[in-house]
Image: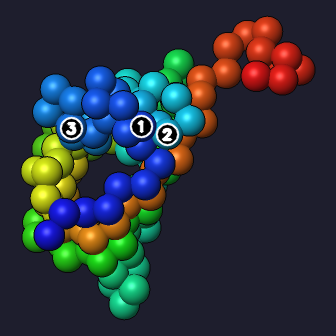
Amino acid sequence: MITEIVGVSDDPRHGVASGGSGLYEFWSADGVPVYLHDTTLVSVLWEPVLRGLGLRFAGDGAASVAMRFEGVVILEWSQDNEGLDDAPDEVAGQVSEFSYDGGDGFELVTAQSVVGFTATRVSVSAEPVRRTGDEGSGT
């Protein structure tokens, strides 16, 4: 089975499959560049009855990204706090990798956690970085 991916560019140069970068680096369907290596995983919402998984990423100078996965089966969920007990949240949640196998498998790796899962659908939304002076410019 292949996961339906919504909200990601269909341009082969900027899509999920370009360069094999998966959900780690891509452009949204609205043309917003997404570089998860510049973000922190700030929230996880697991809905076991609905088989839903929501992830939210944010970071200074990076697009804010929300991902909603459906039809999720968790294969692995591990956490290692060693050496991170006193670290700021943005260090523990720093995204190291978010791979997609081209079928239905995903693996999110942060400095603290590994989450491996399958999903039937993912919806992605990204808000562009606001730069000083953008306020009121309509962009």
Q: Residues within 10 Å of mark 1 (few under 14, many from 20)?
A: some
Residue type at mark 1 is: Ser
Q: In the visual, does 42 lie left or right of 134?
A: left
SS for tag 2? loop
Q: Residue furthest top?
A: 133
> Which tag, 1 or 2, sits closer to the chain's start?
1
Hey, what amino acid is under mark 3?
Answer: Ala
- Position of 58 with respect to 100 (left or right) is right
Per the image, the residue denoted by label 2 is: 29
Q: Nearer the viewer, residue 94 or 30?
A: 30
Assign a secondary structure to mark 1: loop
Q: Residue at x 53, y 47 (%)?
A: 125
Q: Residues within 10 Å of mark 3 (few under 14, many from 20)?
A: some
Q: Is residue 79 visible?
A: no
Evaluate if marks 1 and 2 touch, with contact meaning CB atoms under 8 Å apart.
Answer: yes
What secondary structure is found at the residue carrying circle 3?
loop
Q: Quadrant of residue 94?
A: top left
Residue 63 lies, with reference to residue 56, above or below; the image says: above
Which amino acid lies under the numbered mark 2 shown in the image of this protein?
A: Ala
Locate residue 135, reporting x and y percent: 83, 19
Q: Nearer the viewer, residue 88 or 101?
A: 101
According to the picture, the residue beneath numbered tag 3 turns out to be 17
In space, the residues marked 1 and 2 are separated at their CA atoms by: 4 Å
Task: Tell me the number on the disc at residue 9.
Answer: 1
